[in-house]
Image (tube, grey):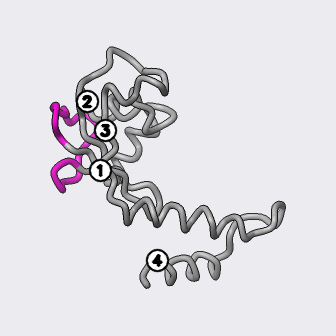
């Protein structure tokens, strides 16, 4: 199965075009190599997807016929994301809670502060 179709089918991305776009931008890796959207994935391979500052890792268990419900995702993939990456994601969520609602998008200064916190 194509990597973009697989990522869409197991709900890593909301649309297949978003999955393809991430592949074209070099944010999807298999065995440490950047992959194109048409790259065929095999069972037991680990697919790494970089979303923002966090890299998610998924092990392919089998292939769905089409997009599956959220309850069935665990039959087709296993989340093997490193704990450090999950901590990074949680820190980002907590940092965003500090911003009052309605203030707008984060500033460049906010982004730099977040990056300093993650490098420590």
Q: Nearer the viewer, residue 16 or 51?
A: 51
Identify which residue is drawn at 46% across, 65% down: 87
Distance, label 3 to label 1, CA atoms, is 12 Å
Front tag of 4 and 3 = 3
Mark 3 surroundings: few (<14), some (14-19) or many (≥20) residues within 10 A: some
Of mark 2 and mark 4, the one earlier in the sequence is 2
Assess whether residue 98 is covered by the magenta stretch. Answer: no
Mark 4, residue position: 118
Tell me, yes or no, if residue 28 can be seen here. Answer: no
| Image quadrant containing the C terminus | bottom left
Can you say whether 100 is above or below 26 in the image?
below
Mark 1, residue position: 48
Mark 3, residue position: 78
Of mark 4 and mark 3, the one earlier in the sequence is 3
Q: Is residue 50 left or right of residue 91?
A: left
Identify which residue is drawn at 18% across, 32% down: 40
Of mark 2 and mark 3, the one earlier in the sequence is 2
Determine the secondary structure under disc 3: strand
Distance, label 2 to label 3, CA atoms, is 18 Å
């Amino acid at each position: 199965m194509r990597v973009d179709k697989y990522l869409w089918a197991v709900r890593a991305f909301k649309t297949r075009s978003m999955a393809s776009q991430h592949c074209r931008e070099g944010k999807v890796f298999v065995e440490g190599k950047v992959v194109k959207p048409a790259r065929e994935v095999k069972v037991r391979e680990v697919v790494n997807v970089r979303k923002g500052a966090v890299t998610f890792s998924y092990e392919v268990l089998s292939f769905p016929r089409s997009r599956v419900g959220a309850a069935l995702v665990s039959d087709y993939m296993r989340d093997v994301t490193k704990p450090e990456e999950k901590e990074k994601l949680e820190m980002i969520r907590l940092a965003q809670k500090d911003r009052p609602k309605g203030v707008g998008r984060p500033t460049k200064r906010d982004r730099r502060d977040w990056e300093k916190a993650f490098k420590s």
